[in-house]
């Protein structure tokens, strides 16, 4: 029964199981990397010190709230396609390319780490979008277009702040 439900989920969308599996693999890569970034930004939010504390502390809270929303939309897209998202911290740490942050960083180093992570997340979003376009998965493509535009804007704002 479960297999039938899965078949239905993507057959009505116009691509086959092999194509859906490739898209889901790319979505899971984005999901597990973004989940590491989410915790990393909370770490920075809690531990930032210095003269720009109020700016950085507050901005990072907005970032991890945004990250939580984005992660949710990626995981739910995987469910919509009829698969299960990676859902444990152990799986995220095992599969993510992005590393957790170690030690105390200056606020500027934290901002630079976020910028670098957003660049990697953008590359994973583009990977998902490329597959979605190839296979005609308009829903995933549309989601990635939104996420790419929003992440590019955040990347620009952090880059501008880092030049203070
Ligand atoms: Fe807080």
Image (cartoon, rainbow, N blue to C red):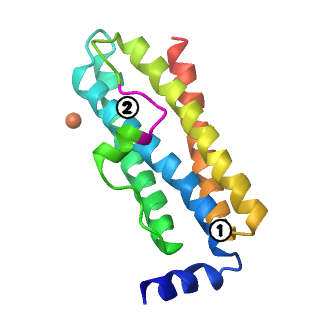
Q: Is residue 48 toward the left or the right of residue 144 in the image?
A: left
Q: Is 141 within the magenta?
A: no
Which badge, 2 or 1, comes first in the chain's sequence?
1
Taking the spot 36% from the left edge, 38% from the top edge, the residue there is 93
Query: Do we see residue 118 in this rendering?
Result: yes
Q: Where is residue 111 in the image (x, y as percent from the top left)?
A: 44, 20
- Classify 10 Å Cα crowding around label 1: few (below 14), some (14-19), many (20 and above): few
Taking the spot 38% from the left edge, 39% from the top edge, the residue there is 94
Q: Mark number for residue 59?
A: 2
- Where 119 sits versus 95, above or below? above
Where does label 1 land, which residue?
18
Viewer-closest of 118 and 80: 80
- Where 7 sits versus 127, above or below? below
Magenta stretch?
95-100
Q: Position of residue 86 (x, y in %)?
A: 39, 55
The verdict on label 2 being within 8 Å of ligand 1 is no
């Amino acid at each position: 029964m479960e297999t039938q439900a899965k078949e239905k989920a993507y057959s009505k969308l116009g691509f086959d199981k092999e194509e859906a599996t490739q898209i889901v693999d790319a979505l899971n890569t984005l999901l597990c990397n973004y989940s590491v970034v989410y915790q990393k930004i909370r770490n920075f939010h809690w531990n930032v010190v210095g003269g720009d504390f109020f700016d950085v502390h507050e901005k990072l809270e907005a970032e991890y709230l945004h990250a939580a929303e984005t992660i949710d939309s990626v995981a739910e897209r995987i469910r919509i396609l009829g698969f299960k998202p990676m859902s444990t911290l152990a799986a995220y740490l095992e599969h993510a390319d992005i590393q957790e942050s170690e030690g105390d960083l200056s606020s500027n180093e934290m901002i630079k780490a976020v910028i670098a992570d957003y660049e990697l997340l953008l590359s994973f979003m583009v990977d998902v979008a490329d597959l979605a376009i190839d296979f005609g998965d308009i829903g995933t493509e549309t989601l990635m277009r939104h996420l790419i535009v929003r992440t590019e804007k955040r990347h620009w704002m952090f880059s501008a702040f880092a030049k203070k």
